Structures are given as C-alpha cells and as structure tokens.
Image (tube, grey):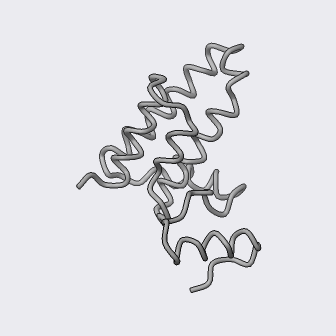
C-alpha cells in the first residue's frame, strides 16, 4: 500500500506537469489525516493555484514556486517530515487544512462540527 505522503508527492508532481489541476489533486488528497506535512502540502498547492496570475507575469517567481513544490514532493516521497519552519509558516494562518472527510458517519460529523465552527467532537 502506498503511503499518504507518497500519494501527495505524486499528486504534486502531476500538478507541476499539468497532468491534473490543483482542484483534482486536492480531491484526491488523503482524507482526515492529522499529518502536518500533508496539511502544509495542501496549503502550498492552494497558494500555487491562487498565484496563477503572478506565475504568468513573473517567470522567476514561477520557477521558484515550482522548485518549492518539487522540494515538498521529494521530501514527502522520502517519507520525511517537511521542515518545521515551513509547517509553522502555514499554521500561523490556518489551524488545519480544509481536507475532505471520510465518506462515513464520523466524516459527516467532522464536517458538520467544522461548518458550525464548533470544532471536532471526540
């Protein structure tokens, strides 16, 4: 079985070569993971898509962002944690990634509590 980190690494690389779009990659992300490295990778992909205009105008920025995403993919592919400063950089703005939940009762309630802004009930 392929690990969640290897799956995310593959998804990032598919986005970088335009085999899939960011939205499709995010839909295929592991669900309900607590892995902070995967959460950071999620946010990096969301920023990648949000910067589409800037990427078209600034080739240096595009290359740096592509290298950054490739570094994330390489680290995850090696089953390593992403650098703590990278994770903390995203955590200062987002408490968690907006990953999809499992398609079961537990996943439904996780999404429901988040929608109500109550937090996850354990």
Residue 88's place in the image compared with 47, above or below, is below
Q: Residue furthest right?
A: 116
At 52% from the left and 39% from the top, the residue drawn is 24
Q: Residue furthest left?
A: 1
Residue 107's place in the image compared with 50, above or below, is below
**Frontmost residue, 81 versus 48:** 48
Residue 5 image point, x, y percent = 37, 51
Residue 56: quadrant of the picture: top right
Residue 119: quadrant of the picture: bottom right
The quadrant in which the C terminus is found is bottom right
**Frontmost residue, 17 versus 75:** 17
Tally of numbered tags: 0
**Left or right placement of residue 93 versus residue 59 in this view:** right
Residue 33 image point, x, y percent = 47, 64
Residue 10: quadrant of the picture: top left
At 48% from the left and 60% from the top, the residue drawn is 31
Residue 87's place in the image compared with 10, above or below, is below
The quadrant in which the N terminus is found is bottom left
Residue 109's place in the image compared with 4, above or below, is below
Q: Residue furthest bottom?
A: 122
Residue 54 image point, x, y percent = 72, 22
Residue 49 image point, x, y percent = 64, 33
**Left or right placement of residue 90 versus residue 18 in this view:** right
């Amino acid at each position: 079985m392929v690990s969640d980190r290897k799956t995310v690494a593959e998804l990032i690389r598919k986005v970088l070569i335009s085999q899939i779009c960011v939205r499709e990659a995010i839909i295929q992300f592991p669900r309900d993971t607590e892995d902070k490295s995967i959460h950071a990778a999620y946010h990096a992909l969301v920023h990648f898509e949000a910067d589409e205009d800037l990427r078209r105008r600034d080739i240096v920025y595009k290359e740096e962002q592509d290298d950054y995403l490739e570094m994330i993919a390489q680290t995850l592919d090696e089953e390593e944690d992403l650098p703590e400063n990278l994770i903390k950089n995203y955590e200062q703005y987002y408490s968690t990634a907006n990953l999809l939940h499992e398609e079961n009762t537990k996943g439904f309630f996780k999404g429901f509590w988040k929608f109500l802004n109550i937090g996850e009930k354990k």
